[in-house]
Image (cartoon, helix red, strand yellow):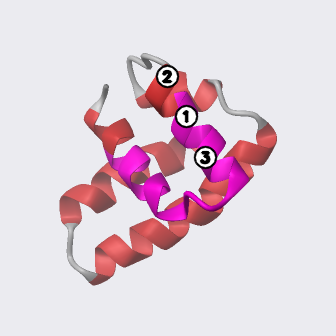
Amino acid sequence: MDNTLQFLRESLSNYENHELSRGIYLKLQQNQYQNEREFVEDLDDREMQYLDQILEREINYAENVQDDVRVSQLREVYELIF
């Protein structure tokens, strides 16, 4: 799995109580996406809207703790959504 998608999967694990989060997490776990573009193309509109919210929150957190690698990786997915 692509490093970017590993960061995303780890972030989603923080929201395991939410149905959409679990569904997206399972997609990442069960499919062999070659890159983040392939993953994003497999998302439906609801999943993209949900990820938009989650990624914004996770990117802000990573910026606050100065985890530049995490910020960069999560932004890659965030930018592909829109």
Residue 70 placement, left or right of 46? left
Q: Which residue is rendered at x = 55% and y = 57% of the image?
A: 16
Q: Secondary structure at mark 3?
A: helix
Task: Examine the rendered structure and indicate whether residue 6 appears above or below residue 34.
Answer: below
Would you name the residue on which mark 2 appears?
Answer: 30
Disc 3, disc 1: CB below 8 Å? yes
Q: Position of residue 50 (x, y in %)?
A: 69, 55
Disc 1, disc 2: CB below 8 Å? yes
Which kind of residue does numbered mark 1 sit on?
Leu
- The magenta-colored residue range is 7-27
Choose the circle earlier in sequence order: 3 or 2. Answer: 3
Q: Residues within 10 Å of mark 3 (few under 14, many from 20)?
A: some
Residue 37 visible here: no
How many angstroms separate mark 1 from mark 2 (CA)? Answer: 6 Å
Q: Which mark is residue 22?
A: 3
Asked if the stretch drawn in magenta spans residue 9, the answer is yes
Task: Examine the rendered structure and indicate whether residue 45 appears above or below residue 13.
Answer: above
Q: Looking at the figure, which quarter contains the N terminus?
A: top left
Q: Secondary structure at mark 1?
A: helix
Would you name the residue on which mark 1 appears?
Answer: 26
Which kind of residue does numbered mark 2 sit on?
Gln
Magenta region, mostly helix, strand or loop? helix
Q: Position of residue 24 (x, y in %)?
A: 60, 40
